[in-house]
Amino acid sequence: MEIQYTLTENHHTMKKILSISLLLLGVLSCADDKSADEILKFETRSNCSVVDDCAAKVEILPLRTAGAMIGEVMQCKETAAGFMVVDYDYNIFCFNASGELQNKIARVGRGPQEYMAIDDVDVDRQGNLYILSMGTDVLVYTVSGDFVGRHTLAAPASSVSVLDDGRLCFTLCHEEDAAYADDRLLFADAELKPLQSALPLRKTTLSAYGFGFEKLFRRPGATSGLYFQSHDRLQYSIDPQGNILKTYTLDFGDYAAPEELLQCRSQEELVDLVMKHDLYYVNNAFESRNFLLFNVIFQQKAAVPEVAVWIWDKRSRKSYIEHYPNEASPLFQLLQFPVNLAEDDTVWYLCDNEMLQAGQEEFAFLQALDIPSEVGYSLLKLRLALEGTYPKNSL
């Protein structure tokens, strides 16, 4: 009896161990699933209205320039202190969180304290601006416009991001004979001393010919950033240490860029391939804790491009897509310039005030807003709210 009891006890013990092991395996499996790569399928038809079905709240923030004129906008960013607008005259306008202009920086020239052009610009938490110019020059100014320093990168880059801890992250252009030729991201300190050679991400040649676009978008206080190349199907969520958190594959079906386009060897070959294919590709991408936001272009050979807004809900793994017939459509004119997707799921769009005024006659969501009458720009703020309120025809 004693022997039988011992065997039975061991049997129960083994069952418990096996049950715990299976439970742990299940937990680990769930953890693996959470971090596994995901395929995001794009649909060529609209399944929602971005504003009516996806936004719970719409607000407007006028940008008060105190008489300064903003030219054609090249980029707009949310910073820790507010917002920054760069125009194609290479002027930088710095606004606080209330939309009041704090300073305008215009230092175009060939002198040692001047920049010839602006490829990209970002701001650290102390208010210092890091301007990437001509691929390799990095000039630093205070938010008041005072010159701080100038540095030179060992390899050309297409963008710069300032991380919360003061480190810099550069997306590198593809050049076979350049330093760091095998890498796509480079992390450096404030003096541009390389801290680590970053990830050898999938590499295309598009940016070398001025057609592709690469960027590690970051939000103030964010724990990750989304790296993308415009025509590539692969998008990477990356943490501030340079680790890949997740890889997203964008499935454009028959309208994806062919591999030969991603690896073409000349500008002429690139243009020829683009003119032979109907392509969907991403020209802007953002990430928050709950969503991915893509601006998508449909290039039909030589025809006028069509556009779409694509929201991916990470929780439900559903897509919300709205297509616009072409760049002349009224809603595209309003939503063509996404600025940021914040951690609270707020999307900012930079809008021309005249477009907003014209849109009040057509769109109900604008009719209750107090739109400035003067010429200039405002930020349109949409708060995404999809959980539990999905459109009836959602995927």
Image (cartoon, rainbow, N blue to C red):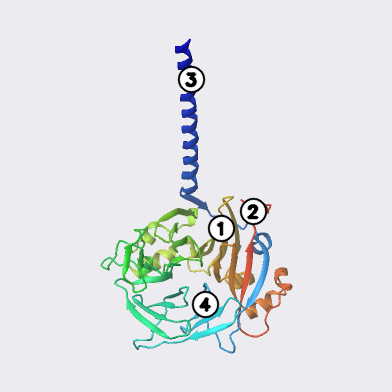
Identify the amino acid type marked 2: Glu
Is 227 rendered above or below residue 84? above
Q: Are marks 4 and 2 in contact (CB under 8 Å)?
A: no
Q: Are marks 2 and 1 in contact (CB under 8 Å)?
A: no
Which residue corresponds to the image point at 57% horizontal and 63% vertical from the top-left? 308
Q: Which mark is residue 9?
A: 3
Identify the amino acid type marked 3: Glu
Label 3 to label 2: alpha-carbon separation: 48 Å
- Please tell me which of labels 1 and 4 falls first in the chain: 4
Q: Is residue 42 left or right of residue 236?
A: right
Q: Which mark is residue 291?
A: 1
Which residue corresponds to the image point at 55% horizontal and 80% vertical from the top-left? 95
Q: Residue furthest front?
A: 2
Image coords of residue 112 (percent x, y):
34, 86
Residue on which the image places disc 2:
387
Tally of marks: 4
- Please tell me which of labels 4 and 2 falls first in the chain: 4
Residue on which the image places disc 4:
84
Image coords of residue 172 (percent x, y):
35, 67
Please tell me whether mark 2 sits on a helix, a strand or a loop: loop
Which residue corresponds to the image point at 50% horizontal and 85% vertical from the top-left? 104
Identify the amino acid type marked 4: Met
Most foreground residue, 84 or 333: 84
Is 37 rendered above or below residue 153? above
Residue 227 appears anywhere in the view = yes
Label 2 to label 1: alpha-carbon separation: 11 Å
- Please tell me which of labels 3 and 1 falls first in the chain: 3
Label 1 to label 4: alpha-carbon separation: 23 Å
Identify the amino acid type marked 1: Phe
Please tell me whether mark 3 sits on a helix, a strand or a loop: helix
